[in-house]
Image: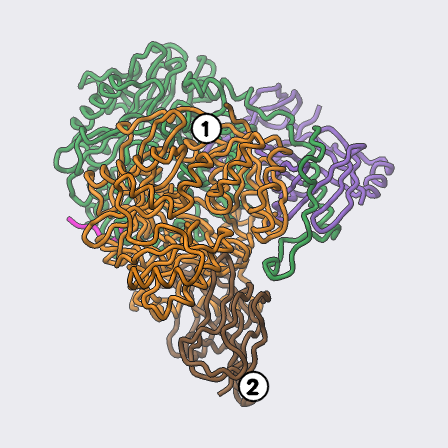
Chain colours: A orange, B brown, C green, D purple
């Protein structure tokens, strides 16, 4: 089986990520876009791009037959689903196969086995991998949910049976709150996965979220690339991820990796996948679920192992052997990813769509930016809030944190609110520095992270007044004319000479 | 040129003179020597006592939003004369009925109150779905719902009035 | 000895590079700028910035006492010279010491020993490191040059006695061309190093330029970080560099590294340095010179070894031990650097100062950008043409080349001519792919690299006409208004549906 | 709207119609359906038969310089009527005396010729120092130097006439 042209059935930074991998492998790329995305970066970067319908995902990015039709018409022979949208939809994978398209992902059966979270929990149990106590079947009636919750005892976690990515997930501390939480969870689950059924788990207190990256080819080779620490979350969605985890030593890495590979083999899994675990305060490990797709946070694993997961995905889908064994996998240094979302972290993470009027991304040593936006781009309100991922590598975790601090300070986005300010405060928090984190960390410390009155208020005031003054024709300041490099030297800068009074 | 600038809860009278990059800015009785350059649309480089700042200034209605050194500040600026007229005219800068307006465009998925309901802080008012997330809005103060201007399923724009409250 | 605040006595991308390293180490930064550089990126990024005089470097960046005065006034306790300007000026290093400033570089004696290229050649000989046949003393009189040239036989290479960076270097194929070449070489040497004396080497035919990165601390630890292949040059200036070299195996790396360390020890060298070698067609190795500073191309070594050379420089200057041994040094994958210069490669590399009206830098996996410019920035005519360095890492050389090809295609600079088009053609050249390169490669293949008439001429014509049409108010096309994310959906895109006739 | 466009040595008559993103462009007898968007200052996204192009268009005097897909093209565009008037007016598009003009600003470090000198292709004419490099200019054709308008040490701007040649 060979691949020559790949349709990328996604949008945003992950579509761009896949397009880049295809280009490096010499593969043609086909983008699809909704009416809201004609000017999206993935459309600009792909070799070809075709419209697939109105803005709402349900009328475009989730319409299987339209996407397949575009793939055939454009002469694509493979299809990469990215994450989200149809990435974990077995019917989609089957439709691709039926249309003679190579689906860059696992076989439909494996998607089903793992996509049904309760079935996955049963499988893990069968293999002797411990799971969080809870229901083993999807619950459709609210009455069943109430009964199961009473049996488990509060706090309980409601999760979407076909869930993933935190959608349709709610923590319920007390029985009284079960009703509204269940309604929100079902509503989110319904719109995100087209199925409102849920299941329950006993809520583990202040757990760590640690996941293992697994790669499996069609020739029976299964390799794990170590873990990712994903405990920094808000609304059950990851915000900061790292590799390696500050609490996982070689021994635990070995054990987690081995368990993950066992699950993957049992499920007849092929291509890239992630097995998620919870680690409680006592260090006991529980299987949570398996994501049968590329993860948002895959870059931290790439930076530390030196593997390119998307290129590997494409080679595996093309039928090639993985090409490396567990012994070839090595981990060098530490990587951290920060998610840049269009949200206002200090206003309940309220989404902040709008036009990015100015954008300056960080660069220099050890900095990687996977972005789906550009200056002048208007972030539509229809899709999730992830704008870009800022990822850094350092020789050790402490150096990586210093680098992330530096890179976040260089990052400027004007026009929409973003998570950058809260990320700056998270990575400089003493508990993060020392690795004392759990999924409860962010909610706990958020109050202390709210910006102080602002050391730079006078400077801001000066800038604002200056802008207004110039706007009114005050000092007729304008961007330095191109002629500034012509002969005839500019006047001396009006800035004070060194040694000027530095009081303040 | 004289301005009155409001930042946070502080009102400052500001005087700025100079041109072509070199400015003198007095805020109250404090004087700043500023070397400024425009380095992009709405982006300024400031050298003050040799300290280097880059500030992004974007005008949003009457407010200048300034991003500098990782901080974001909202500044209201008025020319001095206008300020005098407005304040001496006795108008109030703020005020108006207590309402819940949509902070962002989206779709109403749930309305939890109806006219006449008394609400206490923390009560769920309604839910707006935007960017794949259900955003729940709770009452921040006690009061009575006077008007409900939206219904579930309806789509709204930022700024639309959704609920009106009375005492 | 401790360091808290560093003055960066340079400009452009290297000043930005040093500022970033300082920030990650928690050190304050002080920039200096000429009248032409008030809006330069290093001024915007530093904590503090002070003017040091008129645009010509001789009146600003090369004026030792002004720079020292700023350092003292600003309360800096250390000074990083970057490369070029005063980086290899022993008197500058002494002036820093005299002013109580830590010079981030080697001791003055070592700079002198190596800065005098003929003395360095003598030292290498003494250590049994082979050197290129040529003069062992600086030549001031043209008559001596003519005599020495006759003795050596043509072709000969004229080099500045205090040279470096290709300035004041000229290849002289025939005796008739000695006169003009000598005049240009002396003139360049004079303005670049303040000393017009030169020396001669027999010109090695189609040599490879391979250099070894060395790190030495004040405690006697000397370690090499392997080689860099720098054979792709124009005007004797490097354009593309890589690590490792496609022709250096572990054995040769060992031998080169050992020789480099021997030279460094003998010279009593401390801090980062580079020993340059020529490798001829037969594989014989000749010592060329030692650069007593950070090299432009240091990032390729950083990406492959995982070390941060500038952070190491600062730690060494602060008196800390290097902190790693030769055995700790490992090489992973392959890195390539392309220099983005404001030059027109197809018009004799003519410098192209001017305003960068649009700038889009590449991103994604394995891409690092060290830049000194930004959109809207006006490239002054006073300094060298290097705008930025595009550096990529890949698991192997072939993957790195694919990645560089992808990244160069993403790179867009409007307003000034750059080396990007020729770089795209270089990395896709079959001889580069197979590693059959020498310092003669670029001059030889340049004619074939000149752009073809242009497959995309019709598209360019359409874009130009469209822009004019819109400029005249034709279809009133404008950037999508922010309101486009408000309710009310945009019309269907006017693009053809998939399956439309694709002839052409 | 009708234009005459010159690209390389080809002169094409172009007709463009449409608005709001959808256009029909005919070049000679070939017709293109173009979906276009402005995505930044002078930056266009074009979808033509589903193929995606990003083109940067910058106007330099009468010429539009277009960067697209790693290629750079210079295009002269005239409204059709103007073209007719100009060409029927019998004027020549190009022409003028043979001169050497400074292609970039810099400092003259050496002048190798003087009035009256005969030059043959490859002869060094003068050297301009700019951005730390000595840029040597050689004669591209045979001729006689009529005027030398610069001397060593002098600084020049782009476009300045340095030498004038006669037969």
Q: Position of residue C494 (x, y in %)?
A: 70, 46
Tell which residue pokes out farthest to the right in this image.
D88
Give the x, y percent position of residue A459.
40, 67
Q: Which mark is residue C402?
A: 1
Report whether residue C419 is seen.
no
In reply to whether residue C5 is colored magenta, the answer given is yes
Q: Nearer the viewer, residue A491 or C440?
A: C440
Q: Nearer the viewer, mark 1 or mark 2?
A: 1
| Residue labelled with disc 2 | B85
- Taking the spot 85% from the left edge, 41% from the top edge, the residue there is D85
Q: Secondary structure at mark 2?
A: helix
Task: Report the residue at 18% width, 24% height from top.
Answer: C262
Q: Is C452 in the magenta? A: no
Q: Can you tell which mark lies on residue D98?
A: none
- Residue D166 vs residue C211: left or right? right
Which subunit holds the residue at mark 1? Answer: C
**Total labels drawn:** 2
Residue located 70% across and 33% down the image = C458
Q: Residues within 10 Å of mark 2 (few under 14, many from 20)?
A: few
Say which of C491 and D147 sits in front. C491
Q: Which residues are magenta?
A: C1-6
Q: Chain ID for label 2?
A: B
The x, y position of residue C21, in whole percent, is 30, 46
Say if D92 sits above or below C277 in the image: below
Q: SS class of the residue under badge 1?
A: helix
Spatial separation of the CA atoms under disc 1 and disc 2: 66 Å
């Amino acid at each position: 089986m060979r691949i020559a042209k790949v349709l990328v059935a996604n949008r945003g930074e992950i579509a761009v990520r896949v397009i880049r991998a295809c280009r490096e492998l010499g593969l043609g790329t086909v983008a699809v876009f909704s009416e809201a995305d004609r000017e999206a970066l993935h459309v600009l970067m792909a070799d070809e791009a075709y419209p697939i319908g109105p803005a709402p995902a349900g009328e475009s990015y989730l319409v299987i037959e339209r996407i397949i039709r575009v793939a055939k018409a454009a002469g694509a022979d493979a299809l990469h689903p990215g994450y989200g949208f149809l990435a974990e939809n077995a019917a989609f994978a089957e439709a691709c196969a039926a249309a003679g398209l190579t689906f860059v992902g696992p076989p439909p059966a494996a998607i089903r086995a793992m996509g049904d979270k309760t079935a996955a929990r049963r499988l893990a149990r069968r293999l002797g991998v411990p799971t969080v106590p809870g229901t083993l079947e999807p619950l459709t009636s609210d009455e069943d949910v109430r009964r199961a919750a009473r049996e488990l005892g509060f706090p309980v976690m409601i999760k979407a049976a076909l869930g993933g990515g935190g959608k349709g997930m709610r923590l319920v501390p007390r029985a009284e709150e079960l009703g509204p939480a269940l309604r929100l969870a079902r509503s989110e689950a319904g719109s995100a996965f087209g199925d409102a059924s849920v299941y329950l788990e006993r809520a583990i207190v202040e757990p760590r979220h640690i996941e293992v990256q697994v790669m499996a080819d069609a020739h029976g080779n299964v390799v794990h690339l170590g873990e990712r620490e994903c405990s920094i979350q808000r609304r059950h969605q990851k915000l900061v991820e790292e590799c390696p985890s500050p609490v996982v030593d070689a021994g635990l890495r070995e054990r987690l990796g081995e368990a993950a590979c066992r699950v993957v083999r049992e499920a007849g899994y092929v291509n890239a996948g992630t097995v998620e675990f919870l680690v409680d305060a006592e260090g006991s490990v529980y299987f949570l679920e398996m994501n049968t797709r590329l993860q948002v946070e895959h870059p931290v694993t790439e930076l530390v192992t030196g593997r390119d997961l998307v290129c590997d995905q494409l080679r595996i889908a093309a039928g090639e052997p993985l090409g490396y064994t567990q012994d070839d996998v090595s981990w060098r240094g530490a990587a951290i990813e920060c998610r840049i979302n269009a949200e206002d972290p200090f206003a309940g993470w309220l989404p902040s769509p709008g036009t990015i009027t100015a954008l300056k991304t960080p660069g220099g040593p050890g900095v990687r930016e996977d972005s789906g936006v550009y200056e002048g781009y208007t972030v539509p309100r229809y899709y999730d809030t992830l704008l870009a991922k800022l990822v850094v590598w350092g020789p050790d975790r402490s150096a990586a944190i210093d680098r992330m601090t530096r890179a976040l300070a260089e990052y400027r986005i004007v026009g929409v609110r973003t998570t950058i300010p809260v990320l700056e405060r998270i990575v400089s928090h003493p508990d993060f520095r020392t690795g004392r984190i759990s999924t409860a960390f962010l909610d706990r410390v958020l109050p202390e992270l709210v910006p102080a009155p602002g050391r730079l208020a006078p400077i801001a005031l000066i800038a604002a007044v200056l802008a207004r003054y110039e706007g009114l024709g005050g000092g007729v300041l304008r961007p330095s004319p191109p002629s500034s490099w012509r002969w005839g030297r500019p006047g001396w800068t009006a800035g004070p000479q060194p040694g000027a009074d530095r009081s303040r | 040129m004289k301005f009155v600038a409001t930042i946070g809860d502080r009102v400052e009278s500001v005087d700025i003179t100079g041109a072509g990059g070199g400015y003198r800015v007095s805020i109250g009785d404090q004087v700043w020597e500023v070397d400024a350059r425009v380095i992009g649309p709405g982006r300024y480089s400031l050298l003050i006592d040799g300290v280097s700042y880059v500030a992004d200034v974007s005008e949003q209605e009457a407010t200048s939003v300034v991003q500098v050194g990782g901080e974001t500040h909202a500044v209201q600026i008025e020319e001095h004369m206008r300020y005098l007229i407005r304040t001496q005219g006795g108008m109030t800068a703020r005020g108006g009925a207590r309402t819940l307006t949509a902070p962002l465009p989206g779709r109403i998925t749930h309305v939890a109150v109806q006219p006449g309901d008394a609400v206490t802080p923390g009560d769920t008012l309604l839910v707006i779905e935007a960017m794949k997330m259900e955003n729940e809005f709770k009452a921040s103060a006690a009061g009575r719902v006077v008007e409900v201007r939206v219904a579930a399923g309806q789509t709204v724009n930022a700024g639309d009035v959704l609920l009106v409250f009375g005492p």
